[in-house]
Image (cartoon, helix red, strand yellow):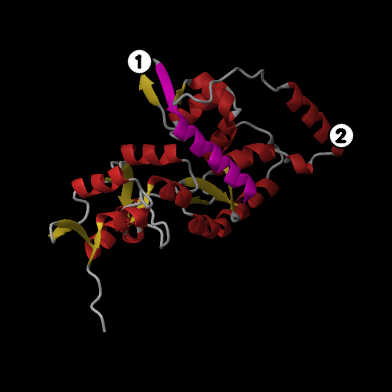
Amino acid sequence: MANERTTMSVPEMQRMLGIKKTDAYWLVHKNVFETIIVEKKMRVVIASFEKWYANQVKHSKVDGPPPGAELKAYSYSVQEMANLLGVSDDVVYAIIKRDHLETFEVDYWKRIRKDVFETWYKGQTKYRTAEDRERDKAQEEMGYTMPEIAKMLLISRKEVYNLLASPKCAGVFEYFTVAEKKRITKESFETWYRGQCKYIKFEDRSPEEQERIRMLQKQEKRPRLMVDPNKQAYDIKETAVLLDVPVHEIRRMISEEELEAKKFGNRYLILKSEIEWWLLQQKMDVEN
């Protein structure tokens, strides 16, 4: 039985990766894998080459398994983390910066170790993986959010919060939280609803009244300002346009920390990533 080869020539390595001669010798020059001199010729140690190949993602073999097998086993790229959480890359970069997540670079790309991700993920509930979002659905179905109640009763969110804070309603509503969103159990809400006569759900109104409300809602549509979609942060008015809510609602969301904003003097700026997260949450609520 012939001895297994332990080295290969630089031209062999070049052909294996399908790269130019200068690129091949640049890899050698950077010492990304081990080389030795055999009969005055440089050769690449195959074991060290395979180790390097399994821990990088820039170069792929012409005919062979994809790169980065070992690297991907213990870390995520920014895009992989974004896919995992169902958010954009910008949101992930904002998370890394805001929560000071430890990262490292491979071929100039940031990566996050899986143990770092898991520690961060367990310490928060705002961002959810697809698997956990699926599990959350059963819990979410047991209650209503404040915006959902406002929509059902045709009142503002402020009125909903005033209603919930009313002494008359003390101990009436039961609360629970899913993914940092407080909900009221459907059972306690329906019990309260049946015991009062001030508020009427849209669905319980007459067809004529429902049509009148629809017409009024169309008339109340606000003219839309032109907002640059490529900005990284927006003021309150621009955010109101992007979220399609009144300006006073944005101010309330900021004051009650539903929307994260940075204050510069008397001016608030909301990051694009925060707006994208809010829109994603609304989409998830509708789909659920």
Residue 116, x across and y down, in percent: 29, 53
Q: Is residue 101 visible?
A: no
Q: Residue, x 50% and y 59% (percent of image)?
A: 131
Q: Residue, x 18% and y 56% (percent of image)?
A: 42
Q: Residue, x 28% and y 48% (percent of image)?
A: 24
Residues drawn in magenta: 267-288
Return the mark for residue 144: none
Residue 86, x across and y down, in percent: 50, 48
Which residue, as the protein is rendered here, is positioned at the far bottom?
A: 1
**Secondary element type, mark 1:** loop
Which residue, as the protein is rendered here, is positioned at the far right?
A: 208
- Res. 69 image quadrant: bottom left
Q: Mark 2 against mark 1, which lies toward the viewer?
A: 1
Q: Look at mark 1 in the image and give the residue it sits on.
A: 265
Neighbor class of circle 1 (other Cα within 10 Å; few <14, some 14-19, many 20+) is few
Front residue of this view, candidates 20 and 187? 20
* Residue 195 included in the magenta stretch of the image: no
The quarter in which the N terminus is drawn is bottom left
In the rendered view, does 204 fall on the left or right side of 254? right
In the rendered view, does 205 fall on the left or right side of 268? right
Above or below 199: residue 220: above
Q: Look at mark 2 in the image and give the residue it sits on.
A: 208
**Amino acid type shown at disc 2:** Glu
By secondary structure, the bulk of the magenta-drawn segment is best described as helix
Above or below 228: residue 67: below
**Secondary element type, mark 2:** helix
Neighbor class of circle 2 (other Cα within 10 Å; few <14, some 14-19, many 20+) is few
Q: Is residue 162 visible?
A: yes
Q: Residue, x 42% and y 23% (percent of image)?
A: 269
